[in-house]
Amino acid sequence: MPLFYGGLVASTIRYARELALMAAAVEGSLRVRLRANRGRDDRSKLRILGYSSTYLPQHRGGSEVTLHRLLQELRARGHETRVLVDEASRPQVVDGIDVQLADDRTVVREHFEWSDIVVAQLKTRQRAIYLSARYSRPLAYLVQIGNSPIATLAGSPDLTVFSSQFVQEQYPSSEPSLVVHPLVPEAEYLTTPGDRITLINLAEIKGGRLFFDLADRLPEREFLGVAGWGKQVGGPVLPNVSFMRPTADVRAVYSRTRVLLMPSSYESYGRVALEAAVSGIPTIAHPAGGLVEALGDAGLWADRDDPDAWIAQLRRLDDPDEYAAQSRRVRQRFERLSPQSELDTLEASLMALSHGIPVS
């Protein structure tokens, strides 16, 4: 009986929370339309407020980098951008974007009232829905990490922006929605490749254990491990393995890299593979859904539970002609994946929402 009542109470709380979020979303939508009908000025540019639980430079994961690149692009198009962040050591300016802590009610109010539209992500979803409704601002919510319970997407923002089709397909009920693949600006990643076999992020989900296994079995090869988020896998002390801390200028990593490893058990996309592709660096990857979408026929594939397959792919790239051909394939893949048309659609959608016009 206690278990039954405990489950009933938990279900009731979840249901009440979802109803409250739905009510907030409806109220927010009505307020946005009333605000627009009262006469929004005719500015052709937006004031866009980014809202994230974590952000650069303290957290340099794919989600933080992707939001930052998106805001930079919108800023380059003439829009004004600011960021509120829940977890940060101090306010600061990052690449010209003002980043403030969301732990002060006055700061939060000032930023929401300043904005025309809010672009939120990660753990801010419920608070962003509430605050957007309270301050009558439309909300676009970025979903960059799939494979999560549907309950984590409770409530209805005005627009859901997915980082890949692979993730969008996991949440068919999140409408209206669109896909904007992560930006990979060529100037920030282009370099001359090095000689290392590299894994970025030594967490288990990213393939840290396989990294050490390969380095142990291939003592004649030089390996580079780059620390990342999450618990990092430890391994034996090997003379052919060197390590790096995360860096703001990731060219420092790719300039030492000849082949990138991505034995991830899950990836919502594969932006790291495309970062490497800018410089023609081939990637050997586990065929996770998001990686397949990013690399397509330019990827070299191996099962993360089959070290022999990874060794075979590495030896395949020992042939200079094969390496050159694979290098051309990944560079051409990068060039084909320009998301400019997706950004145009997003920009138009944000503009419409700021005028109280729903998007479909």
Image (cartoon, rainbow, N blue to C red):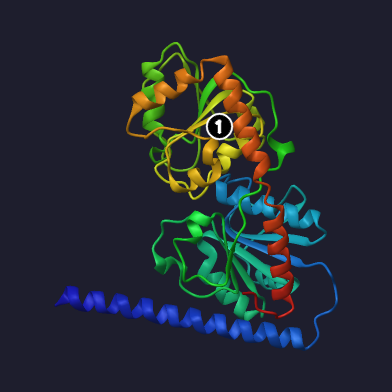
Q: Residue at x 39, y 63 (%)?
A: 149
Q: Is residue 39 above or below residue 79?
A: below
The quarter in which the N terminus is drawn is bottom left
Regarding residue 318, the answer to whether it shows in the image is yes
Q: Residue furthest left?
A: 1
**Where's residue 20, x and y in %?**
47, 82
Residue receiving disc 1: 245
Q: Quadrant of residue 54?
A: bottom right
The C terminus: image quadrant: bottom right
Query: Residue 232 occupies which quadrant of the picture?
Result: top left
Quick check: can you spot residue 89? no
User: For this view, does 204 lie left or right of residue 157?
Assistant: left
The residue shown at (19%, 76%) is 4
Q: Is residue 346 left or right of residue 21?
A: right
| Badge 1 amino acid | Arg
Q: Secondary structure at mark 1?
A: loop
Residue 343 in the image: state x and y as whole percent: 70, 58
Residue 242: where, in percent of width, then height?
50, 21
